[in-house]
Amino acid sequence: MTRFNIYTFMFKPINQPDEPELFPTDVDAQESMENKKSIFNGFFHPATDLKFKSRAQTYEHLVVAQSGGVIVLKIANNTHPILENKFTRTSGEDHPSLFVIIDNRQDGKQVIAIENRTQAFAETNTVATIMEETFNRMLHNYKLMVSIRAKYHAHEFWDVVREYNEGIASVKFTFPYPNMPVISDMVGEYYTNLAKRTNSEPVVILNATNKETVTLDEEDMELLAMIKAASASGKLIIMRPKKARKWRRIGINTMAQEELSDKVLNNLEDQELIPRKWQALIEFLDKIQMVYY
């Protein structure tokens, strides 16, 4: 089985660019938001000059297969291992790759599954950063930007709460700009509309009164909805335990993962095998949860 770390990608408009002269004047950011999925799918067409670049490096890629908003890629790293032969060491060149599966279907969950293959990249977050920088350069012309964040398990919030007998003094939630109805429903109509009206990502801060502690009830439906919205969108929750020197970041220790059979990925680029394996890929994407508990 091949293990994948699960990320979500969320778009937002660039309504007030810092350097307006560098942006197209005939593009409406809100219209681009409405067409974000078709714009994004267009980046993977053969005629598109897609090049993954980050920090002055270019990373080779291969579009293995795509259909209906599902894209399967391979992205290769640039490494220079030390090779030794008959006691002589030389610097070699190697480009190990990993699989990336993107679900950008109209009714999909806006997720990216990145293969956890340390021989290629030590951390999947590195791949997420490369992709985010690349896509944002391409989205520039549409007055859009995207963030790629790892989904995490909602129980991490309560795991940290239970670590501190003295209680929690403050909790900070950040919600994404409205992208997906299912996450907007978790955030609630008030903050969803507020984000659109104010061109913002709403923040909710719970500060305990009178130097006491915040009451965090595991049956509080509104609190549970905020935790679910944050974990589903990959937005970190910031927590300050009482009498503790450091703030805690919730969302870095329980990254969501899923597994896919190696047989599905082997020779996937072989045209004769795609129909048989494509359904397995769709089933893999469909089992990815919006919220991991």
Image: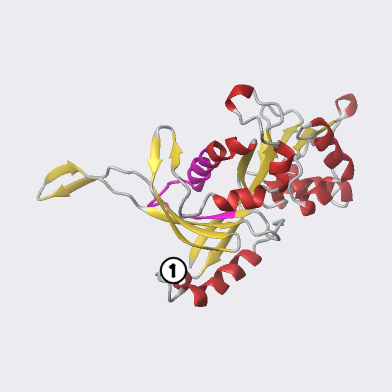
In the image shown, does 163 or 261 lie closer to the viewer? 261
Question: Which quadrant of the figure contains the C terminus?
Answer: bottom right
Q: In this view, does 183 lie to the left or right of 275?
A: right
Residue 240 lies, in percent from the top left, at 73, 32
Residue ID for mark 1: 268
Q: Does the magenta stretch include residue 225?
A: no
Which residue, as the protein is rendered here, is positioned at the far front?
26
What kind of colouring is applied to the model shown? secondary structure
Tell me: residue 48, above or below residue 293. above
Mark 1 Cα shell of 10 Å, populated few (<14), some (14-19), many (≥20): some
Residue at 51% x, 77% y is 276
Amino acid type at mark 1: Leu
Q: Can residue 156 be seen in this view?
A: no
Residue 220 lies, in percent from the top left, at 88, 49
Residue at 82% x, 30% y is 198
In the image shown, does 13 or 149 lie closer to the viewer? 13
Q: Is residue 168 left or right of residue 215?
A: left
Q: In this view, does 269 lie to the left or right of 85?
A: right
Which residue, as the protein is rendered here, is positioned at the far left?
86
Residue 285 lies, in percent from the top left, at 61, 64
In the image shown, does 63 or 25 lie closer to the viewer? 25
Residue 230 lies, in percent from the top left, at 73, 45
Q: Tell me the quarter of the picture where residue 144 sits.
A: top right
Tell me: residue 143, above or below residue 189. above
- Which span of residues is magenta-colored? 112-134
Residue at 88% x, 51% y is 221
The secondary structure type at the circle numbered 1 is: loop
Q: How many marks?
A: 1
Q: Tell me the quarter of the picture where residue 82 sits.
A: top left
Q: Does the magenta stretch include residue 133?
A: yes
Q: Can residue 265 be seen in this view?
A: yes
In the image shown, does 38 or 186 lie closer to the viewer? 38
